[in-house]
Amino acid sequence: MDERLKKQLDFILEIDKEKNIFRQTHLSGRGRNENDAEHAWHMAIMAYLLQEYANEPVDVTRVMLMCLIHDVVEIDAGDTYAYDTEGLKTQKAREDAAKERIYSLLPDDQKQALQSIFDEFEQNSTPEARFAHAMDNLQPLLLNDSNDGGDWREHQVTAAQVYGRQSKTAEGSQKLYEITDELLQKHIKKGNLRP
């Protein structure tokens, strides 16, 4: 087997480990905790289906790839819960180290391409990155809504915390942010989100 193919296959096996990284969000219908691979797949499908609601025209293939690779670094860095203030302090350093190790398994051209897409997502400076962030925020919100706000109640999350995180949704899609706001208002009224 040539070296390029061997590197590609090694990377493919390495990213299978993403299926073992469990998130705080539960599957719809009060299922088990979802894993990072399920989250990424769900986001990618959402990006395709909801692309018409992006604030700006987007290259949906690039958005979908961004969705699929954005959490690969969590194989090493672990999942940092969105409202874990202590974990968020070290998240970037952990993820940068993971990005270098994991993407270095690939041939150099593919390493550079995927790291560039990952960095674009992190910088949130293109229409594609902003729309991908909208998917990253909307996906767990939809699951949490389907579970009657159970994850928010369990972690005693406040409305201000969720609105703070959801601000990136509006940057990618004003229409989807309106839906987000409706859902959050419903959960505030029900007492699932602390004021």
Image: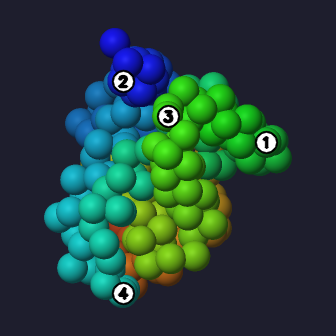
**Pointer 2: what residue?**
5
Instruction: Say whether residue 183 is visible.
Output: yes
Quarter of the image for residue 51 reads: bottom left
| Left or right of 79, for residue 72 | left
Residue located at (37% from left, 41% from top): 39
- The residue positioned 27% from the left and 62% from the top of the image is 61
- The residue at the point 71 percent across, 42 percent down is 96
Q: Which mark is residue 56?
A: 4
Residue at the disc numbered 3: 107
Q: Give the Cα distance between marks 2 and 3.
A: 9 Å
> Which comes before the other along the chain, label 4 or label 3?
4
Label 3 vs label 1: CA separation?
Answer: 24 Å
- Neighbor class of circle 3 (other Cα within 10 Å; few <14, some 14-19, many 20+) is some
- Label 1 crowd bin: few (<14), some (14–19), many (20+), radius 10 Å: few
Q: Secondary structure at mark 4?
A: loop
Residue 167: x, y in percent? 56, 74
Q: Nearer the viewer, residue 144 or 192?
A: 144
Q: Earlier in the sequence, mark 2 or mark 3?
A: 2
- The image quarter containing residue 13 is top left
Q: What is the spatial separation of the Cα atoms under label 2 and label 1, in whole angstroms? A: 30 Å
- Label 4 vs 1, first from the N-terminus: 4
Q: CA distance from mark 4 to mark 3?
A: 33 Å
Q: Secondary structure at mark 3?
A: loop
